[in-house]
Amino acid sequence: MPDAELRQLFRRHLPRLDWQAIETGSTSGGVPDANYAAPGGLEGWIEMKRADHWRCSIRPAQVGWIERRLRFNPRVFVAVRRARDELWFYPGEAIRPLVTERLDAVECPGHWSGGPARWDWDQVGAWLTTTS
């Protein structure tokens, strides 16, 4: 699965958010995998990736979409599940470096290992719903 089951994990561990999986196919390139809404009208986007080693595949259209959207909404993120038990959680501004750099070479405010039960879902939820 291209998103490494991250859609289901985010939905299960952050149930106070309203989740919508996004499947644009050929209608609009680069749109992230998930949109979410939070109480108070906050809304955001997450591009979800799998990395079996130290890199994930990011298309130019994804870079463009995220960089455009960041001009209007600071709540755009990239979540990468590496080797099944690690979560790397980046702000959208990291999208361009992630194209060429290893995951561990890009500044990452959120990195956890030990599988989904040990990832800091409270911290992820706080980042998703921050207002600034």
Image (cartoon, rainbow, N blue to C red):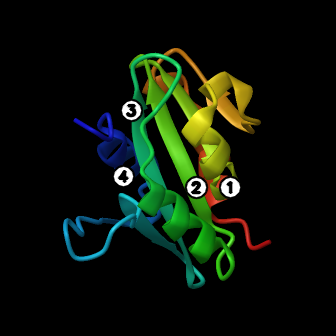
Q: Quadrant of residue 42?
A: bottom right
Other residues around mark 4 within 10 Å, as few (<14) / some (14–19) / many (≥20): some
Q: Which residue type does callout 1 highlight?
A: Trp
Please provide percent x and percent y for residue 120.
61, 34
What residue does disc 4 label?
11
> Residue visible at 36% across and 52% down?
11
Q: Circle 2 is placed at which residue position?
A: 77
Q: Earlier in the sequence, mark 2 or mark 4?
A: 4
Residue 129 showing in the rendered view = yes
Q: SS class of the residue under badge 3? A: strand
Q: Which of pointers 2 and 1 lies earlier in the amino acid sequence?
A: 2
SS for dot 4: helix
Q: Residue at x 46, y 16 (%)?
A: 53
Residue picked out by circle 1: 127
Marks 2/1 in contact by CB < 8 Å: the verdict is yes
The residue beneath circle 3 is 50
Q: Residue furthest right?
A: 132
Whether residue 95 is situated above or below residue 32 in the rendered picture: above
Front-most of residues 13 and 105 = 105
